[in-house]
Image: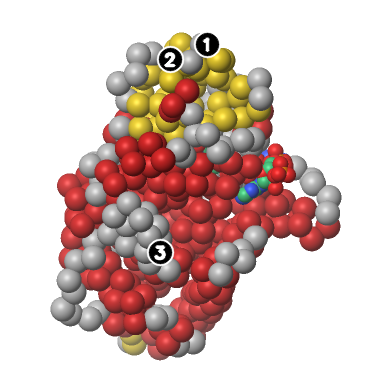
Amino acid sequence: MLDTAATAHDVALPDFYGIRALLTEEERQVQDLVGRWVDEKVLPIIGECFEKERFPDELIPEMAEMGLFGPTFEDYGCAGLSNVAYGLIMQELERGDSGLRSFASVQSGLVMYPIHRYGSDEQKQQWLPDMAKARAIGCFGLTEPDGGSDPGTMKTHAKRDGDDWIINGAKMWITNGTIADVAVVWAMTEQGVRGFLVEKEMDGYTTRDIHHKMSLRASTTSELFFDNVRVPERNRLPLAEGLGAPLGCLTQARYGIAWGGLGSAIACYRESLEFARQRVLFGQALIHKQAIQLRLAEMVRRITTGQLLVVQLGRLKDQDAIHHTQVSLAKWNNVRLGLDIARDARDLLGAGGISVECCPIRHALNLESVITYEGTETIHQLIVGREITGVAAF
Ligand code: TGC
Ligand code: FAD
């Protein structure tokens, strides 16, 4: 981790229930380090990146230097942090922009995790040290053009041919697709779903960026195409068998997103509070108006309940006592509160709120993606519904 001299306790605000006291010293240091970096390096440039549809890839080496990729792993050059520290990293990154958190989520939760969890020793040695240092970038291909909510019906398939597999199909809406050195690709085989490491220079593998997005504009989103791509058996993840394998990866990324939604919410709340202190209307600053106080209090109520939820979730994850339906509830709750707060903050800022110079419109637009990817809000409601009723209603 980078050395940090200054403490930046304001990165932890609002903290209405003293959440900071529930963190270890190391977790507080991690939050301060990443929060200060976001303030100094991300916030000054991110509005322009969003406007110009540019992912700020110049920030990747600094993120790697701070140990933000695969931070919970204890080997392969990773930092061995707690899951709460990992969550705080995701919160601070998303306080900057959902695009940065997306990049980190994919690299850590959707590429390093499956290689670490389902990969061979050779695959781990080949990829994990380089991915921790961002010398290699990854992407995760599950969603297809015909629909993402029901990945069990994927059309991309892999057929065994001697010592190789031949992959055909397409993946869509893939974060980091065109910038990735390796894609974790999920394909149907005669034995069920299997995972493959497709390397960018393999014949028949092509990628293309998706443009004209009004959301996550500071993030690379791509299509992946597989035209008779020959992948050696040594590139198949040996321990990944069945749909549960990619869904297990989603649990990791959804956990980080539950913290990330809070980051967006906190950024929008802070800008609203500051604006309400400054803006004088009808002879008084807006903070004197009951209706404004109600809205700010409502934001803090939502943020506080979301904070308590993810701290407990993180502690359960540290004890390996987490159930994926608990992660679904947290992703649903915290992205929903982030989106509601961002939309309300946009309105509270008046006309200025439609400018990218204020953060709420950017966060609100970003969260329109975040509420859809990694399982739509409806899918998470149905996952929790199935858990409490025992009836699948998908
Ligand atoms: P289902 O029968 O429920 O499950 C099959 C097997 O998997 C197990 N399982 C899970 N394991 C770990 N974590 C989870 N979250 C799991 N969910 C299910 C399950 O226990 C079962 O195991 P077994 O041993 O009994 O076979 O499967 P289903 O076909 O009924 O599907 C259920 C459903 C709808 C919940 C699932 O398909 C789903 O989650 N759909 C949403 C798909 C989704 O979230 N896609 C995300 C793509 S990646 C992405 O969006 C990246 S954005 C990245 C960024 O930029 O940040
Ligand atoms: P669909 O599955 O077609 O759903 C359409 C609508 O139907 C939704 O409102 C949904 O809630 C609703 N619905 C679905 N099933 C039911 C049901 N049973 N009952 C009631 N309503 C239902 N995917 C990856 O694999 N890797 C990535 O890196 C990745 N990055 C992404 C980045 C961005 C910016 C975006 C926007 C998406 C990304 N995705 C990625 C894809 C994402 O996971 C999918 O968009 C998501 O899973 C939903 O799939 P879909 O868009 O095909 O919607």
Real-space Cα distance between discs 1 and 3? 41 Å
Q: Name the residue rendered at 63%, 56% in the picture.
A: 324
Quarter of the figure with the N terminus: bottom left
Q: Name the residue rendered at 34%, 82% in the picture.
A: 25
* x and y percentages locating residue 123 in the rendered image: 39, 37
The answer to which of 164 and 105 lies nearer the viewer is 164
**Amino acid type at image mark 2:** Arg
Q: What element carries label 2?
A: strand
Counting residues from the start of the chain, the first of labels 1 and 3 encountered is: 3
- Name the residue at the front extreme: 121
Of labels 2 and 3, the one closer to you: 2
Q: Name the residue rendered at 43%, 19% in the picture.
A: 231
Q: What element carries label 3?
A: helix
Q: Name the residue rendered at 56%, 37% in the picture.
A: 240
Q: Are marks 1 and 2 in contact (CB under 8 Å)?
A: yes
Ligand 1 image position (quadrant): top right
Residue that numbered label 1 is attached to: 161
Residue 230's disc number = 2
* x and y percentages locating residue 32 in the rendered image: 28, 74
**Amino acid type at image mark 1:** Asp
Give the quadrant of residue 156.
Answer: top right
Residue that numbered label 3 is attached to: 86
